[in-house]
Image (cartoon, grey):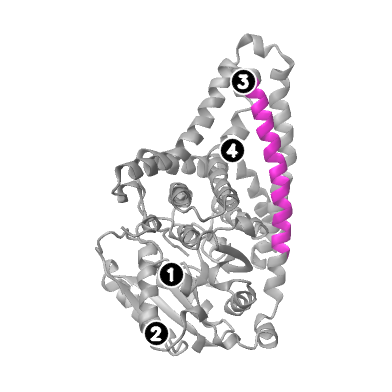
Amino acid sequence: MSQDYYLTIGRSADLKNTGERMLYRFFEMLPGIISLGTIALLVLLSWRAPLIASILVISFVLYWFFRTLYLMFHLWAGYREMRLYERTDWLSRLKAEKPSWQETYHLAVVPNFEEPLEVLRQTLLGLEQNDYPKDHVLLVFGIEEAEGDEGEKKAMMLYQEFSSKFPHFIIARHPKGIQGEMPGKGSNETWAVKEGVKQLVQPLGIEPEKVIVSSLDSDTVVGPSYFSCLTYRFLSSKDPQHTSFQPIPLFLNNIAEAPAISRIFSFSSTFWHTMNQERPEKLVTFSSHAMPLKALMDVGYKQTNVVSDDSRIFWQCFLFYNGNYHVEPLFYPVSMDANVTRSFWKTLFNIYKQQRRWAYGVADIPYFLFGFLKNKNIPLFKKVSLGWELFEGHWTWATAPLVLFFAGWLPLLLGGEAFSQTLLSYSLPTFTGRILSVATLGLITSAIISINLLPRPLYQKKWKLLFYAGQWLLFPFTMIFFSSFPALDAQIRLMLGRYLGFWHTPKFR
């Protein structure tokens, strides 16, 4: 067994050693135990020790209030930085400041399965309209053998349209039924990258150190200066071979067709990633991102046996390089699809499933905990800092909405007659309600920025402006049913060993 065997673990059953398998299984159970334990403890304390429960609730509400203010400042700063990056002529800066910029190539990988031709075409149009030289863009379009003739037909139509624009354009056909693989984006993309290296990078004699891989979801439309901006940041990085680059995802491609709840989740995700751009020490790769080909080859490419391959690749590199790997914020936006289907109720169902799939990134927790134990060369501070950020994020994802909106009433309902006669019992719901009311300033901030991000024709009329702003009143409801519950669902499944497979979000425009 190789010394770094732990880098390719998908689940506890992958480990042959009984002790290691039991330890990893415990780590898989831990997030669910802590989240469910938090809720159960609050209920129990509200019944048996309502005073202690009240103090804990007040403490959490205050913590959440100051956390909201802290993140709102980061949101505004990240938004302003994004707008600045959009206005910058990155190609001119490259030519003026980076004499060797033309030595840098981009391996753009677009994996897909059963995606509409319209969606795929818009993705490739975005790549075509980029200002970076097309002979320095190596385009790999990944299709699945499992899709059959329809997938092949779409691929050939796109190849006929775009091969004249991209001198280096190949179609990578991912075989079905490869042992040990989970069907999904990760396995498709890994096959496509390997084909890109074999058919493009190596025949052209390009050094892997001079290639940046852009992992692009099938609906990702990059801006006109994406590759130029990415090249500039890559060449400006202190350690480019140990750095991933994360753009800001905007879910705007079909925002006009999206119902209010879908828009809220689209913007909420955008805002979360915009905030995190201002906290680079906490960044982990998500969805469409970029990284050096050399690093990808060093770790043996992305895992093909996990759901959340986009975040897992960061932890692979972090462990492989003994903590000497990080993510830099790109601040440049890429546009993707909001969750929309033909039916409103089907859209709600798909939002739940998409949120659950994203929340299944909680499976990274046992991976890095086990990896931290195996790798003694990573500084303890880095382990604790990044580990806590991920752990706390998934814990609050699952529990915070429930605590914020219900826990303030639990001591009053369960604490008995003696507690109900105290001053605290009367003031607790009022206090928590007022703090949360002040925290709604964050919703006002979100509403303002979301309107500014919308395509202008969507809000030219005043009633539409009010409608798009007013949709944020649905936020508390959506956080409980389409954020907390999917996150708990994902954690409970991991805890019980009922592992999720990859579910790709259907696209509709």
The residue type indicated by label 4 comes to: Ala
> Magenta stretch?
52-80
Residue in the picture at 47% in, 43% down: 486
Near mark 2 (Cα within 10 A), the count class, few <14, some 14-19 or many ≥20, is few
- Dot 1 corresponds to which residue? 298
Q: Earlier in the sequence, mark 1 or mark 2?
A: 2
- Dot 4 corresponds to which residue? 400
Which one is nearer the viewer's eye here, 156 or 425? Answer: 425
Specify the principal SS of the magenta part.
helix
Q: Is residue 263 above or below residue 201?
A: above
**Cα distance between the residues tagged 1 and 2:** 16 Å
Q: Is residue 233 above or below residue 363?
A: below
- Dot 3 corresponds to which residue? 411
Q: Is residue 489 magenta?
A: no
Residue in the picture at 61% in, 41% down: 476
- Dot 2 corresponds to which residue? 202
Q: Mark 1 touching mark 2, by CB under 8 A?
A: no
Is any atom of residue 15 visible in this view?
Answer: yes
